[in-house]
Image (cartoon, grey):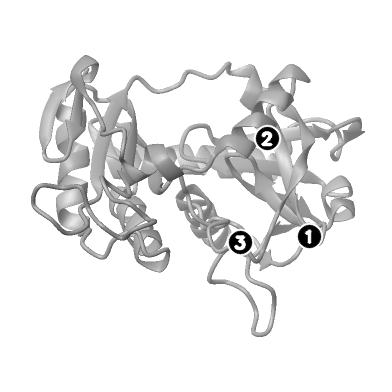
């Protein structure tokens, strides 16, 4: 496998970061996970633009540009000869001390480290989508006052622990709630519920009403595609703060990300969602999303 690392392609076995890189020392960095189909990355520019916006907002770097990053992503896919791929773009704080503000780079200045990998996409059992999955509720809580909570940072340990705990319980995901006990999403996904013919989803970063708490919810790329599909279906959409009762009383529940696209949920802990089957609106949204990916990437 060929890996893009700071402007060069190297064999994965030879790809190295400095032990002084800020990602190693302090878990400072951002990442994007993308899906390629038919030799094209779905919604590539929105992915890189989201990362760049996060890098600026969090003070990681203001040097990143969408064009060169997008080109590097596509070249990485091509170098690995993958028409269908799972691609991860990672940008770290670089060989830079956050404590002293000094760079260890020979060229001086603050240069982030950038690396990209392209691998075969994850293959999920078809039953996950035709029969749905159960989920559990994560023990940790998302904090609206954590400025990094709604960004895809490298500090993912707690979310992966929750996902691992869900797997042990034979569940497909772990639902996160905020410290105010409002739905955030899954460990690695955004959440939607269907109730009385409406599609409801938590506010994401940048969508909060005036005077409200900041949202710790990532503005997902697949989430945005689902909202576009709902509009095309003339399906009423409402972004709002959702409680556990809203979730348990929903007619349908679905989780979205760039890997599984739309994942139906039929049970939360021991509570059945709706009829216990994959709902018709979830089915329709998933079918339309897969068609959209085909049309945009083919």
The disc at residue 264 is 2
The disc at residue 146 is 3
Q: Nearer the viewer, residue 208 or 235?
A: 208
Callout 2 crowding tier (Cα within 10 Å): few <14, some 14–19, many ≥20? many
- Does the image show residue 207? yes
The disc at residue 242 is 1
Question: Where 53 sits versus 165, above or below?
Answer: below
Percent across and percent down for residue 49 are 32, 59
Percent across and percent down for residue 134 are 77, 28
Residue at 52% over, 41% down: 257
What kind of element bears circle 3?
Answer: loop
Q: Is residue 26 left or right of residue 11?
A: right
C-alpha distance separating marks 1 and 2: 18 Å
Q: Is residue 90 left or right of residue 112?
A: right
Residue 15 occupies quadrant: top left
Q: In front of the other: label 3 or label 1?
A: 3
C-alpha distance separating marks 3 and 2: 29 Å
């Amino acid at each position: 496998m060929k890996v893009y690392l700071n402007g060069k392609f190297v064999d994965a076995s030879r790809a190295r970061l400095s032990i002084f890189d800020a990602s190693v020392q302090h878990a400072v960095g951002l990442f994007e996970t993308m899906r390629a189909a038919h030799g094209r990355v779905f919604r590539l520019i929105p992915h890189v633009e989201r990362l760049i916006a996060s890098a600026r907002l969090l003070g990681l770097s203001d040097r990143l540009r969408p064009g060169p990053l997008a080109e590097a992503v596509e070249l990485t896919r091509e170098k690995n000869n993958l028409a269908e791929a799972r691609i991860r773009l990672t940008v770290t704080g670089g060989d830079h001390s956050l404590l002293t503000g000094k760079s260890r780079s020979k060229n001086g200045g603050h240069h982030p480290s950038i690396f990209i990998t392209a691998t075969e996409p994850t293959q999920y059992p078809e039953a996950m989508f035709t029969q749905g999955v159960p989920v559990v509720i994560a023990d940790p809580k998302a904090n609206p006052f954590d400025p990094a909570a709604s960004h895809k940072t490298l500090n993912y340990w707690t979310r992966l622990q929750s996902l691992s705990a869900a797997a042990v319980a034979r569940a497909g995901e772990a639902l996160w709630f905020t410290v105010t006990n409002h739905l955030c999403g899954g460990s690695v996904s955004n959440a939607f519920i269907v109730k009385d013919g409406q599609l409801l989803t938590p506010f994401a970063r940048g969508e909060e009403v005036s005077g409200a708490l900041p949202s710790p919810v990532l503005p997902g790329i697949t989430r945005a595609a689902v909202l576009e599909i709902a509009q095309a279906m003339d399906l009423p959409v409402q972004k709002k703060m959702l409680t556990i009762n809203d979730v348990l009383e929903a007619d349908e529940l679905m989780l979205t990300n760039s890997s599984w696209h739309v994942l139906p949920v039929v049970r939360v802990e021991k509570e059945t969602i709706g009829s216990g089957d994959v709902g018709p609106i979830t089915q329709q949204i998933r079918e339309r999303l897969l068609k959209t990916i085909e049309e945009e990437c083919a």
